[in-house]
Image (cartoon, grey):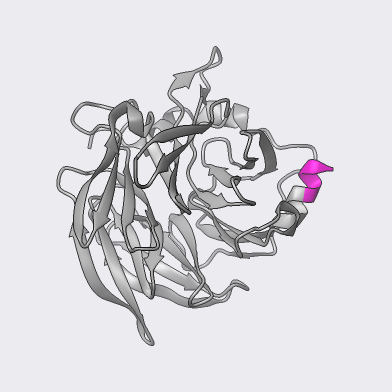
């Protein structure tokens, strides 16, 4: 792969800094931080059934097949339950689950691990041929798995923007091309919709990447709805449900967490010292003021931190 999406982060590092100037109050204080045993953590995932947080670590390069990738399991209080709960991966990124099986994206395949007393036991691998840049995944109640593909910036004909669906172990294309967004990254299944976050497709006069979108696809008809079009963030990575019809969104480029309400209004809730990866929230928020805990992996700091979401919301809205 000549140029991954990560390359655009490096190329536009100065632009990201312009977007991410910290407010006067500085970065929010975490409830806890784990900074040992993690190497380039990309995604955090809260697994309700086991009441634990799974973190993917790609170890070396984001698309290098070196076998150095692994998954760490944490307790909600930050205790490391298993530093290498599952190992032998290459560059694991997005995580999801179907029952007791934890699924993770690993470059061009998704890998499933069954939970056992001794850690993650390899259950299944599903390879998607011709998909060298898989990023995130989301699971539906019926067990269908959706996977995003974004190889390089800008998109190229040999690896177009694409979202796959895997049903009964068989991959197929759910949506591709312009319909999938400029570069689809973050995914979330919310009821009967697949929520998709993209990388911005334009640059402003000061070379800022902007125009990232939040899209929704009907799972049955695949009809697309644009939920937010004026986002100034550069890359919508992690997406978590907030109150009904609204979402918490993490942006690696601008180092911030935003809330997108059901009308598309965007509120910045926090700006971090480092760019965060794919976020997790526990428990799911039913009312905005009663949001729970936010878990943010920081790839460049080799750490994961937890934050009180309600505190961030009050500070941003008062």
Please say if 92 is above or below 74: above
Q: Is residue 71 left or right of residue 110?
A: right
Residue displayed at 61% across by 29% down = 19
Q: Would residue 274 be seen by someone viewing this image from the given angle?
A: no
Residue displayed at 59% across by 71% down = 78
Q: Would residue 288 be seen by someone viewing this image from the given angle?
A: yes
Q: Is residue 317 left or right of residue 249?
A: right
Residue 83 in percent (x, y) is at 44, 73
Residue 145 in percent (x, y) is at 32, 56
Please say if 209 is above or below 94: above
Q: Nearer the viewer, residue 249 or 40?
A: 249
Q: Is residue 64 left or right of residue 59?
A: left
Residue displayed at 48% across by 54% down = 191
Residue 276 in percent (x, y) is at 54, 48
Residue displayed at 25% across by 55% down = 166
Q: What secondary structure is the magenta-colored segment mainly?
A: helix
Count of numbered badges drawn on the protein? 0
Which residue is outermost to the bottom?
A: 117
Q: Quadrant of residue 117?
A: bottom left
Region of the chain picked out in magenta, as a range: 314-318
Q: Nearer the viewer, residue 182 or 167?
A: 167
Residue 295 in percent (x, y) is at 58, 59
Q: In what quadrant of the picture does the C terminus appear?
A: top right
Magenta span includes 26: no
Q: Quadrant of residue 22?
A: top right
């Amino acid at each position: 792969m000549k140029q991954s999406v990560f390359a655009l982060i490096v190329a536009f590092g100065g632009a990201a800094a312009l977007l991410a100037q910290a407010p006067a109050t500085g970065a929010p204080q975490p409830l806890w931080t784990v900074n040992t045993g993690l190497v380039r953590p990309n995604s955090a995932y809260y697994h309700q059934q086991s009441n634990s947080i799974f973190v993917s670590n790609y170890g070396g390069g984001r698309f290098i097949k070196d076998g150095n990738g692994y998954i760490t399991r944490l307790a909600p209080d930050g205790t490391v339950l298993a530093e290498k709960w599952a190992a032998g991966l290459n560059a694991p990124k997005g995580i999801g689950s179907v029952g007791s099986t934890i699924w993770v994206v690993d470059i061009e395949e998704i890998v499933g691990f069954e939970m056992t007393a001794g850690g993650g036991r390899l259950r299944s691998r599903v390879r998607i041929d011709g998909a060298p840049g898989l990023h995130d995944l989301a699971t539906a109640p019926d067990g269908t798995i959706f996977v995003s593909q974004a190889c390089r910036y800008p998109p190229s004909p040999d690896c177009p923007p694409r979202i796959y669906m895997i049903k009964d172990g068989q991959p197929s294309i759910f949506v591709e091309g312009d319909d999938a967004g400029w570069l689809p990254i973050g995914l979330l299944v919310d009821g009967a919709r697949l929520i998709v976050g993209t990388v911005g497709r334009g640059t402003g006069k000061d070379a800022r990447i902007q125009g990232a979108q939040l899209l929704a696809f009907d799972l049955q008809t695949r009809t697309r709805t644009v939920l937010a079009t004026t986002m100034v963030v550069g890359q919508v990575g992690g997406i978590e449900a907030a109150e009904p019809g609204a979402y918490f969104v993490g942006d690696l480029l601008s180092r911030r967490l935003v809330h997108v309400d059901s009308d598309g209004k965007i509120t910045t809730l926090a700006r971090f010292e480092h760019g965060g990866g794919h976020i997790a929230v526990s428990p799911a928020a039913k009312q905005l003021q009663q949001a729970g805990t936010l878990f943010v992996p920081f790839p460049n700091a080799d750490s994961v931190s937890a934050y009180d979401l309600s505190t961030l919301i009050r500070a941003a809205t008062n």
